[in-house]
Image (cartoon, rainbow, N blue to C red):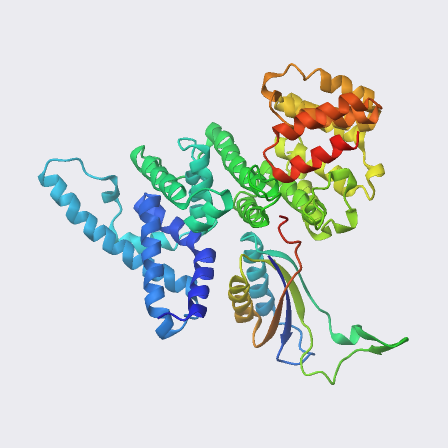
Amino acid sequence: MIAPDIHRTIDAVWRMESARIIAGLARIVRDIGVAEELAQDAFIVALEKWPESGVPQNPGAWLMATAKHRAIDYFRRNKRIERKHEELGRELDARRDVPMANINVAMDDEFGDDLLRLVFTACHPVLSTEARVALTLRLLGGLTTEEIARAFLVPEPTIAQRIVRAKRTLAEKRIPFEVPRGAELAARLSSVLDVIYLIFNEGYTATAGDHWMRPSLCEDALRLGRIVAELAPAEPEVHGLVALMEIQASRSAARSLPSGEPVLLLNQNRALWDQLLIHRGLAALDRAEKLGGASGRYALEAGIAACHARALTADATDWKRIVALYSELARLAPSPIVELNKAVAASLAFGPAKGLRLVDALLTEPSLRSYHLLPSVRGDLLFKLGRFTEAHSEFMRAADLTRNARERQMLQDRAASC
Amino acid sequence: MRFLCIYKPSKGEGLPPTEKDMTEMGKFVEESRKSGVLLADGGCLPSALGARIRRTGEKYVVTDGPFTESKEIIGGFAMIQAASKQEAIELTKRFLKVAGDGETEIRQMYDPPPTK
């Protein structure tokens, strides 16, 4: 029987150390699935030994040393298997080219590079977005399959299978464990950033279920973002993304009432905004801008978030600047959703009539046909223009379209107030 | 979840940290930032520059430092983000390993509960 205390300690150490250990192993065995198994083996040894011996002085180093031994065993075993393969005339595995004597040297190399390789591999475009998300949380966030399943409200076997399949795909397609270079880097980096932001958003505005937010997912995403920002400090967009997430997270406490009802940005009690996160977000945005990244997608979005964060009251918001930032964003990545947001900003900078004209231009947009925010925004503008009957039907339409129970309630309430 | 960590070194005030101490702590702080857990931190100047302000009833009593009568004086603080209290404890052990003997009190900060 393992003392629950030790168990919790080992869980915590796993979360803190597993990414580094898996990353270090993956560079040597060239297969993140195998690397993860070896790392887990090391933790199983810890589970067996630590309750008796106590937690070692440096648990990370202990685990790494144990994992190294497992890697050596793996190569020995593998060599035997390969010999059999040879006898059978099969092709040899590429792993053979890592001489055993080099393992220890290889494991002690710069860990940051390995972690970055792990980030890029887990977010490889050969994988589906869902698989990238699950693998990133598992390998880099140190979450268990069960935790990921709970966060995404998906049955655990689904996530487990997703991860198994993702690892198999990476192995079968022989995806190299490396940081992409040159022209490939930009596209691959944006895949990494998109995965992190998707995790954040799943926590920030739960797309399904009865909860408006799942803060632990936001924290996981923030942590991943901060790690990647330090692993690739010269990449402005990483800082842009971190800035965006820090500033959005700063509003968590103000986004809903104790009853759970969501509060729109402009109605939020700004005294509840977390100044520490705002400060960190503005600093990250500053870093992105100093690196010449002010016009990156995430930096632009962070710039918009920063306009809100800097305004002491909603009235003090620099809406004209926000409209300009949205225009730039729309040029960079044309999207009806950006246009919709721009329309909202324009209504506040230049009046609801101007906003409504921009929104109405989006009514024929096929991708927005079932997007609840279009009728929701339109309802708001019509309401402000005193066109209550039209506003009512727009709010009701929006309520029908949203999948979030809390949001639906809020929209129905607004309809009732028309 | 977030924790406020308050460090109270065992050794008394007076001796400024050596260059080696500073380098090691600098390295630790940098690593903690890079791993995304350290949100804010700071070290305190000698307590002679501080004061304690106490309110009893309607009265305020201000006691200037140094706080010679105190056994342990706050040396610094950190605000960390951890996935669990256990993780915060593990991080604190690592901090103490670098900072030296003393006690760190960790307190979970109020976070708005996930809304239902």
Q: Is residue A218 above or below residue A376?
A: below
Residue A315 visible, this angle = yes
Q: Position of residue B115 (x, y in %)?
A: 64, 48
* Residue name at image x 23 percent, y 51 percent: A75
- Which residue is at the far front? A416
* Left or right of A312 on screen, residue A135: left
* Residue name at image x 58 percent, y 54 percent: B33
Q: Is residue A41 above or below residue A340?
A: below
Q: Position of residue A185 (x, y in %)?
A: 48, 32
- Which residue is at the far right? B58
Q: Is residue A81 above or below residue B79?
A: above
The N terminus of chain B sits in image quarter: bottom right
Q: Quadrant of residue A66?
A: bottom left
Q: Position of residue A77 (x, y in %)?
A: 19, 51
Residue A341 visible, this angle = no
* Residue name at image x 62 percent, y 34 percent: A298
**Towards the viewer: A374 or A139:** A374
* Left or right of A260 on screen, residue A132: left
Q: Quadrant of residue B69?
A: bottom right
- Which residue is at the far left? A87
Q: Position of residue A399 (x, y in %)?
A: 66, 30
**Towards the viewer: A367 or A282:** A367
* Residue name at image x 71 percent, y 83 percent: B70
